[in-house]
Image (tube, rainbow, N blue to C red):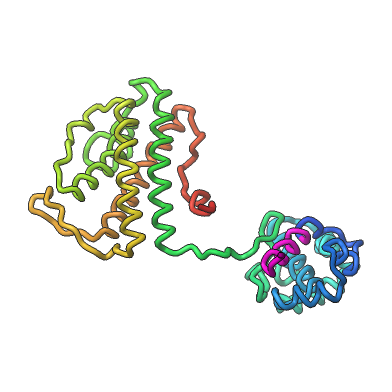
Amino acid sequence: MTTAPDLFAGFVDHLAEALDDHDVGPDERAARLHFSRYHLDRMIRSIAGEPPEAFRRRVLLERAAYRMITTSAPLLDIAVEAGYGSHEAFTRAFTKAYGVPPSAWRRKPGHLQVEAPSGVHFHPPGGLRLPARDQVTPMDLLTKMVEHHVWLTGEMIRVAERLSDEQLDQRIELDVDDDRQTIRSLLSRLVGQMGMWNAALATRDYDWSVEEHESVTSLRERLAAEGPTYLSHVRDVVDAGRLDDTFVDALCEPAEVFTYGGMIAHVLTFAAHRRTLVALAFTSHGIDELGWGDPMLWVAQPA
């Protein structure tokens, strides 16, 4: 049995595919979805808060607004692309939706999206996006950030295998610590940072000597152990809502008390700087496949 969300998703998908099909009227659009115009109007209005044709016109206006600030195309061309037969008709519709004429909006653009009950808007560069059915909580975001950190550290170690010892040990002039920094030392510290906190949470000593001129093989093996362990700690704390809980790091001299949330924030902050230095150093050796290691796309991906 087709549910209302499924019907609406199908309508949005069809609309996205046929957005520029201006020669097709509302009756034919409804028929393509196997409904009469009356039934489709009634169902979409009840779900989206606006009938299909108004929905389509709004999305086309949002796309037109996007074109105005991302291209130098004449307003008449943008009007025709939006399905309007004249500049005057486009100006009237745009002014009603955005409060100012297209020419004024182009000079001083505002918010691209026109308020709509459905939450579905034009999504650059050329699509529509349904609102997420599952809300991403701050806890989910924090976990994804740590997952990205563990993954990216592994990718950097993989890339480092291609470099010679001389390249691995070449000094990086912008240092994050007092010590001399290299790709090798930064990768070792990225893994070691997780290992250090794993040790603190387990109340055991951390062996700092392992970070002294560590081999890539050792880095890979340590990450395979420390990465999942650290991520497991984060997931347990996040799932239980215990970010404000405290633990004692008895390895400090003297012992110190930290919150789990503070510890995770510390790891992500210093790790981001070290990863950036490694990414820049890779670029100097002609390796740019990891880019800047930006987590933006990673956290936007569905689980």
The furthest residue to the front: 1
User: What residue do we see at 41% from left, 34% from top?
Assistant: 156
Q: Indicate the position of residue 295 as horizontal and vertical percent values.
A: 46, 49
Q: Nearer the viewer, residue 165 or 244?
A: 244
Question: In which quadrant of the rendered view does residue 123 lie?
Answer: bottom right
Instruction: State the residue at coordinates (69%, 57%).
Output: 70
Question: Does residue 109 appear in the picture of this structure?
Answer: no
- Residue 6 inside the magenta-drawn segment: yes
Q: Is residue 41 above or below residue 156?
A: below
157 left or right of 29?
left
Residue 124 position, x and y percent, is 67, 57
Query: Is 166 one of the magenta-colored residues?
Result: no
In percent of the image, x 81 and y 75: which residue is there?
Answer: 41
Q: Residue at x 33, y 52 (%)?
A: 269
Can you give x and y, in whole percent of width and height, for residue 138 in the image? 42, 63
On-image quarter of the N terminus: bottom right
Image location (x, y in percent) of residue 7: 73, 66
Q: Position of 21 compared to 173: left or right? A: right
Q: In this orientation, does residue 59 appear?
A: yes
**Residue positioned most to the left:** 254
Classify residue 67 by image quadrant.
bottom right
Q: How many marks?
A: 0
Q: Main secondary structure of the magenta part?
A: helix
Q: Nearer the viewer, residue 42 or 264?
A: 42
Q: Which residues are magenta?
A: 1-15
